[in-house]
Image (cartoon, grey):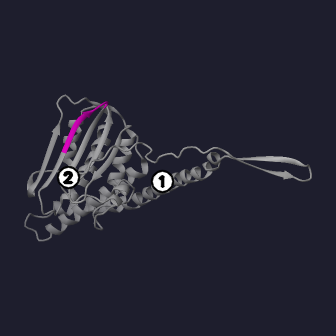
Amino acid sequence: MEAASKPARNARAKPSPKEPRVSFFLDEPAQDILFIVHDERTEARPDEADRRSHAVRLDSMMREISARIAQELNGPLDTVVLYAQLLLAGCSPDDTARQGLERIYGEAKRAGQVVADLRSFSRGNRPDKALVSVEDILRRSLDAVFPGAGTDGLEIVLEVEPDLPWIMADPDLLQRAFAYIMDNARQAVTGGAGPRQIRIRAARAGGMVRVTVEDTGPGMSQEILSRLFKPFFTTREAGNGMGLGLTLSHTIIEQHDGYIYAMSNPDCGASVVVELPC
């Protein structure tokens, strides 16, 4: 796997400040020489401010749209789930309609999770922090994403450093963040011809706890890596997610004053790394 260093908070290098440029001309009526100072450092700021303002407006608009979509879909989906449950309760195990009803129920629940993701994205929930065990959170995430792990040739490996320090975190939000990352790895190895393995490692790294989720999938190109945490970006087929999982993970990790980044080498799998202060 290709090595990669952790990106800084602001990865773009800042150009060295240029010296102010001075020009002058003769004011003929007053016979005075006027000096004009052109400071490019100051002149560049409005453009940067405009870009930041546009990014804030775009983010706000996307969250508002997501909230409205979630609100419109939530009611009808709840109704579908409710009636599917009622019909299933009245079906005998050998009823020919049962298989169809189970599929309706399952698809409605999956769509409900998409709505939940939209609502989470629109709200940007703030963490309610407490002292928690990273290992416990990872195990809860594994149970949520890989019920009955080890079947169908999928190998799940969890490696936790002994005496790993506890951290201040919201256990529910952090579990969701890791669950999204693990689900992304699960999708990456689905249908692969070679060994299918997901390895989760947790260890101390200086003043941080580092969690690495590695998969043996096809890896990612640089283009995909550059867009991996952007809202609604996905490489999955239609109907297999909206591309919000890793965006929400990114938001949650940042709310915990942590870092999240990915590295990959095409055909050699990929890794998502999370670092949290301890």
Q: Nearer the viewer, residue 161 or 222?
A: 222
2 or 1: tag closer to the N-terminus = 1
Q: Residue at x 43, y 46 (%)?
A: 11
- Residue 75 part of the magenta-drawn span: no
**Disc 1 designates what residue?**
59
Q: Which segment is the magenta one?
A: 200-207
Q: As drawn, is 79 to the left or to the right of 32?
A: left
Residue lying at the far left of the rendered structure: 94
- Which residue carries the number 2 mark? 215
* Residue 120: image location, x then y, percent: 38, 50
Q: Position of residue 273 (x, y in %)?
A: 28, 45
Q: What amino acid is at disc 1?
A: Asp
Residue depicted at 33% across the width and 58% down the height: 222
Looking at the image, residue 79 lies above or below residue 8: below
Binning the other alpha carbons within 10 Å of mark 1 as few (below 14), some (14 to 19) or many (20 upward) gives few
Picture coordinates of residue 276, whole percent (x, y) = 32, 36
- Which residue is more in the foreground, 118 or 208? 208
Spot occupied by residue 38 in the image (x, y as percentages of width and height): 69, 48
Number of numbered discs overlaid on the protein picture: 2
What residue sits 61% from the left and 50% below the top? 44
Question: Label 2's element?
Answer: strand
Badge 1 element: helix
Indicate the quadrant where residue 77 lies: bottom left
Q: Is residue 205 magenta-colored?
A: yes
